[in-house]
Image (spheres, rainbow, N blue to C red):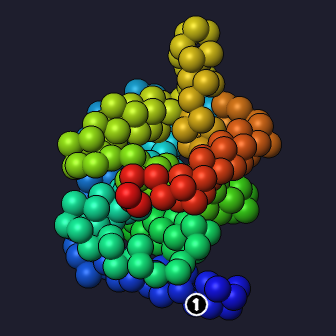
């Protein structure tokens, strides 16, 4: 197929994936926003008067960027992974397999739609929570860069998980034992700099930490790690998982007999 036809096909699949989650936006967008607000109300209320981060930043202000980025990451992963496993379980994936779309078109469509959902949920969380304690806006370019790169990486991981899983139980295991722990242990609710040296070292092995920390740097201008280091780690991680996902799609891993 020519490049123009591939691009049009990828656009059509992308539109279908966006429409899929938007049709149930109360569940896919509004519900995660509500969950983030509940986290803010509980943790912010309990710790606001007891914890200061980076010397002068209030805990609620510190928490908001972490919740925004956590929402972006989790929902980007959920979108691509749930779409693929649902198509495999219901059997309608065959309608995509008979098309001449390349593995690149699949990748762009699924990851692109995952990024849209992740960014929409993150924006919703920001709009709702920013009224509690505006976190500031020190360097917006860092905020946008890490949000987009983080959403792309998690959408790609979701694509890999959806290709690997053959039933919903396997996908739930991937999310509960890999994605959720790495997200919650990335510094969303605390500054990694406040941990003992050993656990700081462990945290620095978690690529999710660099996504959260780099994103938070854009709000306060300070962070636990250099934003350039964070950008390098996140960018390198994305290229790695993107290469794996593209190779799996090219082979038709667990989707072509």
Image quadrant occupied by the C terminus: bottom left
- Where, by quadrant of the figure, is residue 5 drawn? bottom right
Badge 1: how crowded within 10 Å, few (<14), some, or many (20+)? few
Look at 22% across and 49% down and name the residue there. 168
Furthest residue in direction front, as rendered: 257
> Horizontal and vertical percent for residue 238?
64, 49
Q: Is residue 116 above or below residue 231?
A: below
Look at 72% across and 43% down and name the residue there. 236
Q: Is residue 62 above or below residue 256?
A: above
Report the side of 161 relative to 166 (left or right).
right
Badge 1 is on which residue? 8
> Horizontal and vertical percent for residue 122?
45, 62
Does residue 132 appear in this view? no
Comparing 142 with 249, the one in front is: 249
> Horizontal and vertical percent for residue 32?
30, 59
Look at 46% across and 81% down and name the residue there. 99
Q: Is residue 117 above or below residue 133?
A: below
Does residue 174 appear in this view? yes
Q: Is residue 39 above or below residue 29?
A: above
> Helix or strand or loop: what does disc 1 sit on?
helix
Comparing 176 with 33, the one in front is: 176
């Amino acid at each position: 197929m020519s490049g123009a036809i591939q691009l049009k096909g990828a656009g059509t699949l992308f539109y279908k994936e966006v429409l899929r989650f938007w049709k149930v936006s109360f569940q896919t967008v509004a519900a995660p926003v509500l969950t983030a607000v509940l986290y803010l109300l509980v943790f912010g209320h309990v710790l606001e008067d007891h914890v200061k981060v980076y010397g002068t930043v209030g805990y609620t202000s510190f928490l908001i960027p972490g919740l925004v980025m956590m929402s972006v990451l989790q929902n980007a992963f959920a979108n691509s992974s749930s779409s693929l496993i649902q198509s495999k379980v219901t059997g309608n994936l065959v309608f995509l397999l008979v098309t001449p779309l390349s593995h690149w078109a699949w990748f762009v469509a699924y990851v692109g739609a995952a990024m849209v959902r992740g960014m929409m949920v993150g924006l919703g969380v920001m709009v709702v929570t920013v009224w509690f304690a505006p976190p500031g806006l020190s360097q917006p370019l860092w905020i946008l860069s890490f949000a987009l790169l983080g959403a792309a990486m998690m959408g790609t991981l979701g694509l890999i998980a959806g290709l690997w899983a053959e039933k919903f139980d396997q996908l739930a295991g991937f999310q509960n034992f890999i994605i959720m722990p790495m997200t919650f242990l990335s510094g969303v609710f605390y500054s990694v700099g406040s941990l003992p040296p050993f656990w700081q070292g462990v945290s620095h092995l978690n690529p999710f930490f660099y996504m959260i920390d780099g994103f938070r740097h854009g709000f306060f201008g300070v962070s636990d790690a250099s934003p350039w280091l964070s950008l390098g780690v996140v960018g390198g991680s994305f290229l790695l998982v993107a290469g794996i996902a593209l190779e799996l799609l090219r082979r038709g891993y667990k989707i072509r007999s």
